[in-house]
Image (cartoon, rainbow, N blue to C red):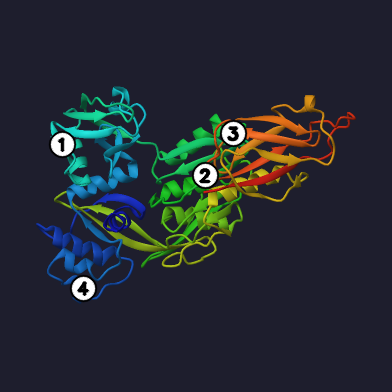
Amino acid sequence: MKVRILQIKILTVLLLGIFTFTSTAYAASPLDEVRELLQRYYVDELDEEILEEPTIEEMLEHLDPYTAYLTKEELQTFVDSIEQSYVGIGIMIEKGERGVRVTNVFPNSPAAQSGILIDDELIAINGEETAEMELEEVTGKIKGEAGTTVMLTLQHAETITPYIIQLTRENIQLSSVTAEKLGGNIGYMNVSVFNEQTVPEMKKALREMEDVKKWIVDLRNNPGGYVTASQRMIGLFPEVKNALIVESRVSNYTLPAFVQTTQFQRKPAVLVNDMSASASEVVAGAVKDANAATLYGETTYGKGLMQALYELSDESALKISNARFYTPKHNKINEQGIDPDVETETPLVDAHLAMLLEDYKEYHGLEPLEKIDPEKAIDIRFTQPIDKDTISTDTIQLIELGGGEVDYTSQLIDKRTLSIQSTDPLKAGSQYILVVHPNWKTTSKETASQGIYVQVLVNE
């Protein structure tokens, strides 16, 4: 719970900008600067009793949870969290019953270049064993300044002999967008934060996968970022003209979408949940108002306050809520959130299925197959005898919903029954769709008149 609160307080943001503040008071202290900033820019006019509190902490206790004082170090952490940059060796770790394990290795990082693998056990750092360390202590010892070194003792999951490597810490720049092609030629983008690189990375994916016409954009657990990045993302949706309405103490105005030269060609799906906040809600609200995307998932977080970040004279900063924002149709976001079009606990599965079925409108859907054993073959019974020589890899598709194409073998059990066996066991608890396209023939050489599909639900 402590980690979640910290994430909401520090990361959940729709940031207008980062400004250097010069106080009008002579030899002003951070306390005086904070007091003046709140008086000038806070979203609501404040009572003198609040502004006269003796400490910054006591002043902020009266305000919204997103207005916060940041030390120099916290300011750097905050900016790095949006920019997706940090100094390190390029791994993510967790601590469990099997000790400290590597859960991710970032491409082109010192860790990747040295041969560290996912699921390696981290035994020691600079000779100090990690067994009795808390996770925060482990990460603290791995971190350091760029150019300095750290010595790690690790062990691959399938070996019994540890190995020792010395790594030089570097500035690590992470991508805010990961993109891949799902089964059935559906594009998928996961967007982790809204920064200056987010939309360029999305446009790059659109160009590199130009054969993909349908896209799923995943904003689940995305805490926000820069307002300009949300305006640019909305500009990827051709139908959307406006991004949000802003209301401050001094003015109300509408911010437009920044139209992009590369855009989505078909109506995308957007995935959201209760941790999609701030800039994520700007995008969700704008595309929903314009019916430019279908929202799948849960009601969003409900953070409708915009912040500006002011750097103070001692290099600390004040993150101050200076305006409320609404959808282009003036629907409230703060403490309310954006409701999805399709409420579901499995948004990726449901969005993927819906997009696939758009292409199979003329196909006949069979009753779903439930409680399928992961290693059992899937049998389909046809109304007419099948010419086995006309069944090819182009005839049958087995697709994991939310995933990719699945390799399989097929055989005729009898003249009317086709058996599909996945090369590897199906994933327990997952859902699949099996599609038979109408390019096969009957034994009397008649071409099939209609394709068929069946949804497959695998046992836990």
- As shown in the figure, which amino acid type bears the numbered disc 1? Glu
> In the image, what residue occupies the spot 41% across and 50% down?
222
From the viewer's side, name the closer residue of 117 and 290. Answer: 117
Q: Which image quadrant is residue 138 in? A: top left
- As shown in the figure, which amino acid type bears the numbered disc 4? Ile
Q: Residues within 10 Å of mark 2 (few under 14, many from 20)?
A: some
Asked if residue 35 shows in the view, the reply is yes
Horizontal and vertical percent position of residue 263 = 57, 40
From the viewer's side, name the closer residue of 116 and 263. Answer: 116
Furthest toward the front, the residue is: 414
**Lower sequence index among marks 2 and 1:** 1
Residue on which disc 4 sits: 50
Q: CA distance from mark 2 to mark 1?
A: 37 Å
**Lower sequence index among marks 1 and 3:** 1
Q: Residues within 10 Å of mark 4 (few under 14, many from 20)?
A: some
**Lower sequence index among marks 4 and 3:** 4
Q: Which dot marks residue 428? A: 2
- As shown in the figure, which amino acid type bears the numbered disc 2? Ala
Q: Which dot marks residue 406? A: 3
Q: CA distance from mark 2 to mark 4?
A: 56 Å
Q: Residues within 10 Å of mark 1 (few under 14, many from 20)?
A: some
From the viewer's side, name the closer residue of 272 and 154. Answer: 154
Q: CA distance from mark 1 to mark 3?
A: 42 Å
